[in-house]
Image (tube, helix red, strand yellow):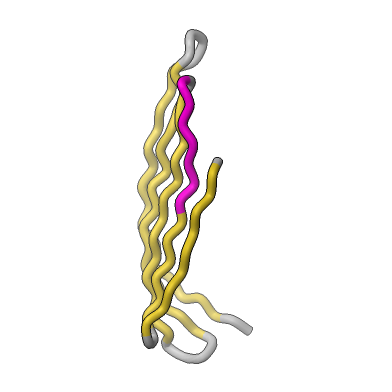
Amino acid sequence: LLHLAGEGSYGHWRISLAADGLASPQGRAFDLGARVGYDISRDGVLFAGVRMVEGGADTDEVYNFAQINQLSLGLSWAF
């Protein structure tokens, strides 16, 4: 899969984006995610994110596709 990611910040706010994906005549796969965080201290970040994974194959022997959606809330602490 090809990967593209980036992260930026503005004051106490952070945003990060990530994408993995590739398509071919036999099928495709994509993994897309975004996360927003807020610095609560020098070492701690509260965050919320969303992620979507989608893909599958369509050949003479196999046909399958799936889509998975995910929400996350969390606390990240560096030490």
Q: Residue 22: horizontal and vertical position, in percent?
A: 49, 36
- Compared to residue 9, the image places residue 32 above or below, namely above
Residue lying furthest bottom in this view?
Answer: 41
Viewed as shown, does residue 67 lie left or right of 20? left
Q: Quadrant of residue 72?
A: bottom left
Please identify the dominant SS of the magenta region: strand
Residue lying furthest top in this view?
Answer: 60
| Total numbered badges shown on the rendered structure | 0
* Residue 11 in magenta stretch: no
Magenta segment? 19-25
- Compared to residue 41, the image places residue 16 above or below, namely above
Q: In the rendered view of the protein, which quadrant contains the C terminus?
A: bottom right
Q: Residue 58: horizontal and vertical position, in percent?
A: 44, 18
At horizontal 47% and vertical 64% (from top left) the residue drawn is 6
Viewed as shown, does residue 70 lie left or right of 59? left
Q: Residue 23: horizontal and vertical position, in percent?
A: 46, 31
At horizontal 55% and vertical 41% (from top left) the residue drawn is 1
* Residue 23 in magenta stretch: yes
Front position in the image: 40 or 27: 27
- Compared to residue 50, the image places residue 67 above or below, namely above
- Compared to residue 16, the image places residue 29 above or below, namely above
Q: Quadrant of residue 15?
A: bottom left
Q: Residue 16: horizontal and vertical position, in percent?
A: 43, 66
At horizontal 48% and vertical 41% (from top left) the residue drawn is 21
